[in-house]
Amino acid sequence: MRTRFRHGLAAALTVSTLSLVAACGGSDGAKDSGKDKAADKPSAAQTTSAAPAPATPLTAAQMKAGVLELKDLPSGWKTTKHEDSSAVYKIDKAECDVLAPMLGGDIAGATKGATADFAVGNNDSEITEEVVTFDGTGAADYVKKLGAALDACPTFTADAEGNKMKTEVKKITAPQGAEEALAFRLSIEIGPGMKIEPNLIVVRQGTGVMRFLHLADAAGKKDFDALAKTATDKFVKGAQS
């Protein structure tokens, strides 16, 4: 079945784009690049096990157990909920198509599990998380395809109903602890001189995949490493329960 990576970024790319950019200070990659920490160093997928993925999909209970709860986050965060975006994103390069779901699309072949959305302040920082599962080797196949796209697609253009957005892709250091993990930053031009730069991780444990997006203002970007590690550990524990 099809499953949507639904909230923070999709909302940012539709009706709330301008207000979100204002909240994030409208910073672009050039302004922030000097402040990036170790998380910005390119890294291949982190792996801790060469064992083949089991064929049994995760249960609904395992997927729910693998998603963050408010109690898992530092003080100041709150639970939020956004409407799904109806936009359909078309990518100008076939080899980059697997990146379309990161903008609000669907993952073919995945069964949807639990989701979570959180924010700090006036949405100064946002988290969107989703867990899905696959039959057979589908999860490993998906992560392999995504990894190849990250190598082949340093740039692409996404078209949503005639609204074209130039996007740059930069691999960053993935959290340790799962069988496979990819981490990357999307720098999305949403208007002249305006960009949003969410950090994302895609983590596989067995037949499950967790996708985590962190969209933050300049001050909040430093929290990505710790938040990504917390999300990864929670997902791995849930998938193994």
Image (cartoon, grey):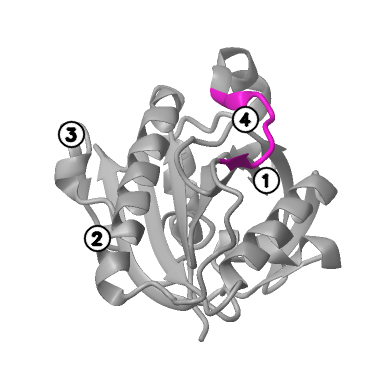
- Disc 4 and disc 2 in contact, CB within 8 angstroms: no
Q: Secondary structure at mark 3?
A: loop
Q: CA distance from mark 4 to mark 2?
A: 36 Å
Query: How many numbered dots are placed on residues in this image?
Result: 4
Judging depth in this view, the residue of 41 and 53 nearest the camera is 53
The residue where tag 2 is placed is 65
Q: In this orientation, does residue 83 appear?
A: no
The residue where tag 4 is placed is 28
Left or right of 49: which side holds 123?
Answer: left
Q: Position of residue 181 (x, y in %)?
A: 56, 46
Q: Secondary structure at mark 2?
A: helix
The residue where tag 1 is placed is 189
Q: Tell me the kind of residue under disc 3.
A: Gly
The residue where tag 3 is placed is 76
User: Which label sits in the foreground, 4 or 2?
Assistant: 2
In the rendered structure, which disc, 4 or 3, sits on the residue that comes first in sequence?
4
Q: Tell me the kind of residue under disc 4.
A: Asp
Q: Secondary structure at mark 4?
A: loop
Q: CA distance from mark 2 to mark 3?
A: 22 Å
